Image (spheres, rainbow, N blue to C red):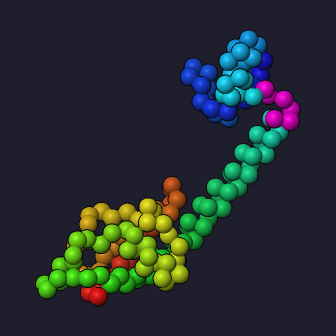
Amino acid sequence: MKVILLKDVKAQGKAGEVIDVSDGYARNYLLPNGLAKQATATALNSMKMSKEAEDRRRKKEHDEAVELCKKLAGVTVVVKIKTGANGKLFGALNTAAISDALKAQGYELDKKKIVLAEPIKQLGKYTVQIKPFAEVSGKVNILVEAE
C-alpha cells in the first residue's frame, strides 16, 4: 500500500515522503496513529499543491530579506541608552534595543535576526550583522549615543 508520511517514522522515511509499506503495517499502525495517510490521487495532488505554495512563500520571504539587506546597507541607526560618567553603558546594548530603533526608522526586523559578535558596552559606532533569512545576511551601522 502506498502512503504519504505525515510525520517522520523511524526506518521508513521523513514527513512528506510517499512510501510503499505492507497493508497490515499501514492499516494497523501508520493510519490509526496519524503517522500517514493513504496515497490517493487527491492526496498526492494536494501534497504537490501545498509544496508548490510553500516554495513560492519561501521564495517571496527570501526576496524580501535580500531587499531589506540592500536597504539597511547604507543606514545608520541611532540608539540612545543610559550611560555612566565615563561613557560606559549600564549593562550592554541588546538586540531588542536595536530592533526597536530599527522599527522607529520604519524597518521591521525581529530581534532574533540580529547577530552581535560581542556585547556592546561603550558609546560609539558599530557594525552589526543581520540575518533576516537562512542564507541571507547583511550589515547595519549602529551609533550608540548617551541618552
Residue lying at 77% horizontally and 41% vertically, measured from the top left: 48
Quarter of the rendering containing residue 7: top right
* Farthest-out residue, front: 32
Determine whether 89 is above or below 26 in the image: below
- Is 97 or 124 nearer to us in this picture? 97
For the N terminus, the image quarter is top right
Residue 21 can be seen, yes or no: no
Residue lying at 66% horizontally and 62% vertically, measured from the top left: 60
Determine whether 32 is above or below 129 in the image: above
* Farthest-out residue, left: 86
- Is 108 or 31 nearer to us in this picture? 31
Q: Which residues are magenta?
A: 38-43
* Farthest-out residue, right: 41
- Is 95 or 27 nearer to us in this picture? 27
Residue 146 can be seen, yes or no: yes
Q: Is residue 39 magenta?
A: yes
Residue 80 is left or right of residue 138, and the answer is left
Residue lying at 37% horizontally and 78% vertically, measured from the top left: 141
Quarter of the rendering containing residue 116: bottom left
Determine whether 136 is above or below 143 in the image: above
Residue 105 is left or right of residue 32, and the answer is left
* Farthest-out residue, bottom: 147
Q: Is residue 142 magenta?
A: no
| Residue 52: x %, y % from top left | 74, 48
